[in-house]
Amino acid sequence: MLSSRLKLVSGGSNESGIEMMEQPLEKSLEEAEVEVVLRGIRIPPQPQILVDLHMQMAMPDFSLADIAELISRDVGLSGLVMKAVNSPVFGMSRTVSSIDHAIGLLGLNSLVNIINAVSLQQTIADQSAKTLNAFWDNASDVAVTSAAISRRLDLGSAEEAYTLGLFHNCGIPLLAQKHDDYLNTIGQAYQMTDQRVTDFENQMINSNHAVVGYYVARSWKLPLYLCEAIAEHHKADLSLQSDEISQANKKNLLAILKLATHLCATYRVIGSSGVDHEFESYGQPVLEYLGMSQIDLADLRDDLIDMGLVTL
């Protein structure tokens, strides 16, 4: 049985000279550095439906009925959202039959998180090469598994965990559009035993998928802590060391994500690696943060296999 108590990892000095993010990323980078990172990369704009949705929600007298009607006008998006909401991981006791119904059961903010996630996948996937099909399949697996872990541990928002699962590697297809050999580069990065994935990317292309993903999430108006989780997901060990109470949402999401990417074998799908070098390096701090033992991890894996979310 999983321990319900969370354990905070004690602080310590940062390794490899990498500084933890203590402020929004755009404030920690000079304007020229941001220009270099994003040069030649087209950040996909929010679909008009999301722009309209945020405008409606900003009005002081908006109604949930109007919001539901607005979302329902986009039949394709509504179908994807309903498919996600009705998946087993969100634990609906009965089938959700309408957007109206989904708002009533999940709440508007949770539904918007899911809409953001499926919209981003649809927007970028439409621009991606067919060679990235396995990437998107894995992103979906990670999203669903993250939501399942969140619910299983009763930790944070399952909808936000789902969103992070889909968004966290969204910089990869964008960088693949810019750099012809990028998929080989990111594959090599996942195979490194003495270097962080993003450090290897920086060395090879002077940019990395985590920082690109951060700017995508910011432009799509995701919560700042979720954007920062995207930026920091390859240095989660450093982020988990922070004892700042205000960082709890981000740390919860990061710990869940690292567990989900390990269980879904992202290292194998993207890096063609037989070993999850990241989890070997700092899987233990992740488990300690979640209050889990190796036995708990094995039990969780078995449960997720039974649910059809993780394969052997």
Image (tube, helix red, strand yellow):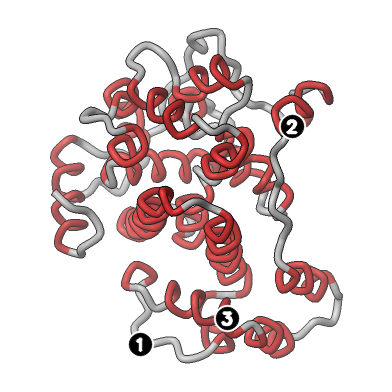
Element type at mark 2: loop
Element type at mark 1: loop
User: Which quarter of the picture shows residue 35?
Assistant: top right
Earlier in the chain: of badge 3 and badge 2, it is 2
**Label 3 packing within 10 angstroms: few (<14), some (14-19), many (20+):** some
Residue at mark 1 to residue at mark 2: CA–CA distance: 47 Å
**Label 1 packing within 10 angstroms: few (<14), some (14-19), many (20+):** few
Residue at mark 1 to residue at mark 3: CA–CA distance: 14 Å
Confirm or deny contact between disc 1 and disc 3 (CB under 8 A). Answer: no
The disc at residue 39 is: 2
Q: Amino acid at mark 2?
A: Arg
Residue 111 is left or right of residue 298, and the answer is right
Q: Position of residue 183 (x, y in %)?
A: 45, 34
The disc at residue 103 is: 3
Confirm or deny contact between disc 1 and disc 2 (CB under 8 A). Answer: no
Q: Position of residue 247 (x, y in %)?
A: 58, 37
Q: Position of residue 39 (x, y in %)?
A: 74, 32
Q: Amino acid at mark 1?
A: Arg
Q: How many marks?
A: 3
- Along the viewing direction, whichever of 245 and 18 lies nearer the viewer: 18
Earlier in the chain: of badge 1 and badge 3, it is 1
In the rendered image of this protein, does residue 219 appear above or below residue 176?
below
Location of mark 1 (residue):
94
The disc at residue 291 is: none
Residue drawn at 57 percent across, 19 percent down = 202
Give the mark toward the camera: 1 or 2.
2
